[in-house]
Image (cartoon, rainbow, N blue to C red):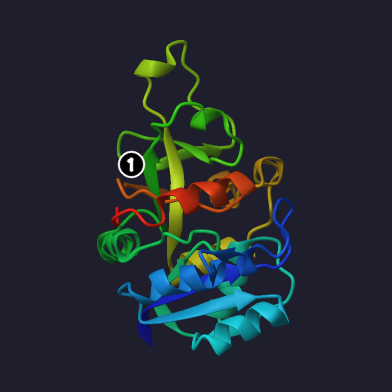
């Protein structure tokens, strides 16, 4: 058994950007940029999980490992499908739309899981600083307890505040880091009304009383969800690493 398996769910279909994993960013496919970042981390094995023969081919021709999966409701369910085939202590869900993922994002999550006593899932959160970002539905906001456990995730601008300038807001960014048993527990649970309403799989855990640990990061990243995100990536790609 390995310690950490990293899985990159790469679904071909996308409402905003069909075929998103194969979109080229500065000449290299999005899925390969994610794979590059994940392979530099402390994960023992990295696999792309996809429902597309074309994505499978691109990854394998680039020397990466990929596995075909059936249609799944969420990326987390796709990750669980792969994890059942490969025993590991921890399982990383590396978001397939994050071409700027780095070891500085992944490795602290692995370290956190090694000592975590309460939660079976660790996620990264980052303070929202850009004007208007809290109002974007593609940005997933999170509110936390004083001890750093997630209270709620939403596409709405939470928490509400009369004075937005003085209220700290956080967003979820980057990978998910699971204990293996917690991932399979997640996959066995039904999709509740909150998850379906917000289209956020983390809410499946909160609706069922499971704990999620939030780990704050300062690492900057751009997740590709819209054509505007592609333009933003193009603008910062040649800047020094964050």
**Residue 164, how many percent across, how many down?**
43, 17
Q: Residue 156: where, in percent of width, then height?
A: 59, 30
Residue drawn at x 70%, y 40% is 197
The spot of residue 142 in percent (x, y) is 47, 38
Question: Relative to residue 211, is residue 78 depicted above or below?
Answer: below
Q: Residues within 10 Å of mark 1 (few under 14, many from 20)?
A: few
Image point 71% across, 77% down: which residue? 52
- Quadrant showing the N terminus: bottom left
Residue 90 visible here:
no
156 relative position to 238: left or right = right
Please name whichever residue, 102 or 171, is drawn nearer the observer in this view of the structure: 102
At horizontal 53% and vertical 69% (from top left) the residue drawn is 27
State the residue at coordinates (39%, 69%). 37
> Is 114 displayed left or right of 17 in the figure?
left
Q: Which residue is mark 1?
A: 148
Q: Nearest the camera: 25 or 110?
A: 25
């Amino acid at each position: 058994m390995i310690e950490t398996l990293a899985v990159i769910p790469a679904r071909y279909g996308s409402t905003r950007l069909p075929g998103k994993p194969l979109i080229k960013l500065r000449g290299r496919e999005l899925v390969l940029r994610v794979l590059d970042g994940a392979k530099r981390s402390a994960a023992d094995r990295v696999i792309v999980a996809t429902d597309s023969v074309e994505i499978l081919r691109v990854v394998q021709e680039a020397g990466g490992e990929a596995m075909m999966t059936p249609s799944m409701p969420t990326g987390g369910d796709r990750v669980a499908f792969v994890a059942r085939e490969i025993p590991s202590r921890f399982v990383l869900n590396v978001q397939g739309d994050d071409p700027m993922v780095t070891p500085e994002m992944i490795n602290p999550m692995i370290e956190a899981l090694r000592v975590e006593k309460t939660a079976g899932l660790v996620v990264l959160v980052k303070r929202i600083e850009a004007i208007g970002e809290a109002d974007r539905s593609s940005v997933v906001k999170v509110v936390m307890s004083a001890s750093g456990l997630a209270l709620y995730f939403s596409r709405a601008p939470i928490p509400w505040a009369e004075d937005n300038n003085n209220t700290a807001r956080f967003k979820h960014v980057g990978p998910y880091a699971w204990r293996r048993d917690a991932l399979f527990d997640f996959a066995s649970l039904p999709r509740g009304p909150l998850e379906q309403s917000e289209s956020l799989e983390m809410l499946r855990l909160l609706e069922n009383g499971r704990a999620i640990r939030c780990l704050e990061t300062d690492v900057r990243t751009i997740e590709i969800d819209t054509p505007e995100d592609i333009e933003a990536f193009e603008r910062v790609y040649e800047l020094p690493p964050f």
